[in-house]
Image (cartoon, grey):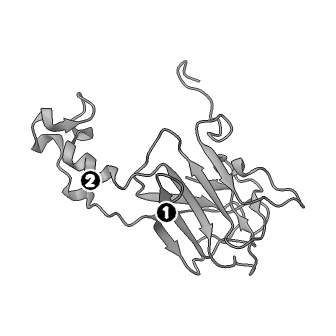
Amino acid sequence: MHAHRRSWCNPATNGTVLITSTPVVKYPPSLPVTAILANNPTRCILDQCSEPQFTVDLRSFHVYPTHYSLRHYSTHDSEALRNWKLQGSNDARVWVTLSAHYFDTSLHQAGQCFTWQIASPVDINTLQTAAEVPKEQCYGMEDCEIDRIHTSDVQKLAQYAYRYFRVVMVNPNSSDHWFLACSGFE
């Protein structure tokens, strides 16, 4: 291990991010909702209710998402998500749907991961790089030309960056139940 590297730690258990949800299943017991941010498949399942959901609060960070991944829980091939929305917010009151899925069969095996692309409201190919604009109008690392983006483009991206992300189940899962079974979100 390198001297400056730390071993992996779930960001929801060390306080880097907060995660909340509708209640987890009591029997057979589910792990706490923080297990959704674990780095390996676990048994995390939210109890049946109308629109079960979990929310990740990035606290002091905002992210402009281009993709996201979910992992099915580790217990069975059943209870897989089929109908849900990924939403973003900056105040946890007004939500923007970033991706909606209906009858999506991408997750079908225990512990399986899948990554979806999020349609971008900003065409990243049109952003000006540092090579195209004067240095004083750029934002980013001084010694890394490719990481500098024109200030006006940073503002374009910032309006689509979110602090809160939530997954809301909108119709029953693969077993025709309202359990939200998930052991991974990134």
Q: Position of residue 33 (x, y in %)?
A: 72, 52
Mark 1 residue element: loop
Give the residue type at disc 2: Lys
Q: Nearer the viewer, residue 46 or 42?
A: 46
Q: Nearer the viewer, residue 3 or 151?
A: 151
Give the residue type at disc 1: Trp
CB contact under 8 Å: marks 1 and 2 = no
Q: Position of residue 78 (x, y in %)?
A: 75, 73
Structural crowding at the residue carrying mark 1, measured as other residues with C-alpha within 10 Å and reported as few (<14), some (14–19) or many (≥20):
some
Task: Determine which quarter of the picture holds residue 121.
Answer: bottom left
Sequence-wise first label, 1 or 2: 1
Q: Is residue 84 above or below residue 56?
A: below
**Residue under the point 45% across and 59% down:** 67
**Residue under the point 78% across and 56% down:** 43
Judged left or right of residue 151, residue 64 is right
Mark 2 residue element: helix
Judged left or right of residue 75, residue 37 is left
Judging by the rendered image, the residue that carries numbered circle 1 is: 95
Q: Position of residue 116 (x, y in %)?
A: 48, 65
Judged left or right of residue 15, residue 140 is left
Q: Nearer the viewer, mark 1 or mark 2?
A: 1
On residue 156, which mark appears?
2
